[in-house]
Image (cartoon, grey):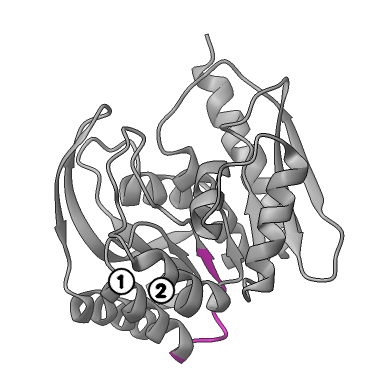
Amino acid sequence: MALRRNPHVLVVGGSDSSGGAGIARDIETISSIGVRSCLAVTALTVQTHESVTEIHHSPPSLVAGQMRAALQTDDVAAIKIGMLATAENVVAVAAVLRENPHVPAILDPVLASTSGRALLEAGAIEVMKRDLMPLCSLVTPNGFELALLVGAERMADEDGAVRQGRELLAANAQALLIKGGHASGPQSTDILLRRNQQPVRFDAPRLAASMRGTGCILASAIAAHLAKAGPLEDSVRKGKLFVFEKLQKTSP
């Protein structure tokens, strides 16, 4: 019962045997911010830092069962969603979110690995947009993921990315954080979009360092700060700073 009184982030995602991304990164990040984690594993993968060679999907009933057990056992104050792998898992996760509308959920739409291996099956993107995104407090796509979500070419400029983001807001997303880590230029800019509000920019100097799992780290850091009762914009700002400081430590 002592654990129950501490805020937890429920991490819903896949394993990465290299430890570079996925639930290993999530737990590491959330713990370093002083919040506990509980888990629902959606897939087991065999991967290195260079490639993904095997993916084994969890059945949707198992994913939903893990989520419900965690929510029943722990004081879950936020949910971080990463790799879902199948349309059936997307539907299962959405069903649990509908049962728990008071818990904010952060969706990092994991669509492909860094090496290019698809991590969400064909056809599941539309299910994600229809059934899951409207239930999430924040969705955190990078430029490539944003283009896939809207079914268009990736925008090379910030204004184009914002237009695509507004398309997702019109499709009932609550809020988007468009990540600028894969863009170019001296500044790495993330843009928070919400309905009927002006975009909010989060700037940081672009570093020469490279690290796998930065998307996992950012979404998990935001979820951890939300679990500590931080407002969304402040949680995003702190999450961005957390990733920047992490990258600074690995800079040449």
- Disc 2 from disc 1: Cα separation: 6 Å
Identity of the residue drawn at 29% across and 51% down: 119
Report whether residue 5 is seen.
no
Q: Which residue is mark 2?
A: 127
Dominant secondary structure (helix, strand or loop) of the stretch shown in magenta: loop
Q: Amino acid at mark 1?
A: Ala
* Residue at far top of view: 252
The residue closer to the viewer here, 89 or 156, is: 156
Name which residue lies at 68% across and 46% down: 161
Identify the residue position indicated by label 1 in the image.
87
Say what secondary structure mark 2 lies in. Answer: helix
The N terminus: image quadrant: bottom left
Q: Can you give x and y, in whole percent of width and height, for residue 177 in the image?
A: 65, 53
Residue that extends furthest to the bottom in the rendered view of this protein: 99
Q: Are marks 2 and 1 in contact (CB under 8 Å)?
A: yes
Q: In the rendering, which numbered label is found on residue 41?
A: none
Give percent across and percent down for residue 174: 66, 72
Crowd rating for badge 2 (residues with CA inside 10 Å; few <14, some 14–19, many 20+): some
Asked if residue 4 lies in the magenta stretch, the reply is: no
Which residue shows up at 51% across the image and 58% down it?
Answer: 149
Q: Is residue 138 left or right of residue 47?
A: right
Q: Nearer the viewer, residue 46 or 147?
A: 147
Write down the region rendered in magenta: 99-106
- Vertical side of 91 occupied by 215: above or below: above
Mark sitting earlier along the chain (2/1): 1
Tell me the quarter of the picture where residue 47 sits. top left
The total number of labels drawn is 2
Q: Amino acid at mark 2?
A: Val
- Work out whether 94 lies above or below 123: below
